[in-house]
Amino acid sequence: MKKLLIVGLVSLFSMSVSAADIEAGKAKAAVCAACHGADGISMIPMYPNLKGQKAQYVEKQLKAFKDGSRADAIMAPMAAPLSDADIANLAAYYESLK
């Protein structure tokens, strides 16, 4: 039973990752480049690098900025207009940068 549950969870995770559109994320990331760098490496010490970040982490942080559970005067208005698909696409894009 445990093995079936693990296989099911892995399959579910794989579907959510593959559902994201990396190219759409790349297009949406043009706005992010001002602070986080064109290649996801920030030239400004106070802004984090996003290149290679795990998609789940990026999604969690963007959703937290969007719903207000993580407060930041700069990121909150940047995340507010993002749809769930936008967030997934951005996360997939940054994870794809190796």
Image (tube, rainbow, N blue to C red):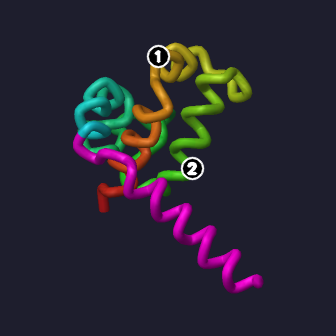
Tell me if residue 9 is in the magenta stretch.
yes
Amino acid type, label 1: Pro
- Secondary structure mainly formed by the magenta segment: helix
- In the displayed structure image, the side of residue 32 where residue 66 appears, left or right: right
Q: Which span of residues is magenta-colored?
A: 1-23
Q: Nearer the viewer, residue 38 or 16?
A: 16
Q: Nearer the viewer, residue 79 or 12?
A: 12
**Crowding near pointer 2: few (<14 within 10 Å), some, many (20+)?**
few
Answer above or below: position of 5 versus 36: below
- Quote the CA–CA distance across marks 1 and 2: 19 Å
> What residue is pinned by disc 1?
81
Q: Secondary structure at mark 2?
A: helix
Residue 12, position as x, y percentages in the image? 55, 62
Residue 27, position as x, y percentages in the image? 23, 33
- In the displayed structure image, the side of residue 19 where residue 23 appears, left or right: left
Q: Residue extending furthest right?
A: 1
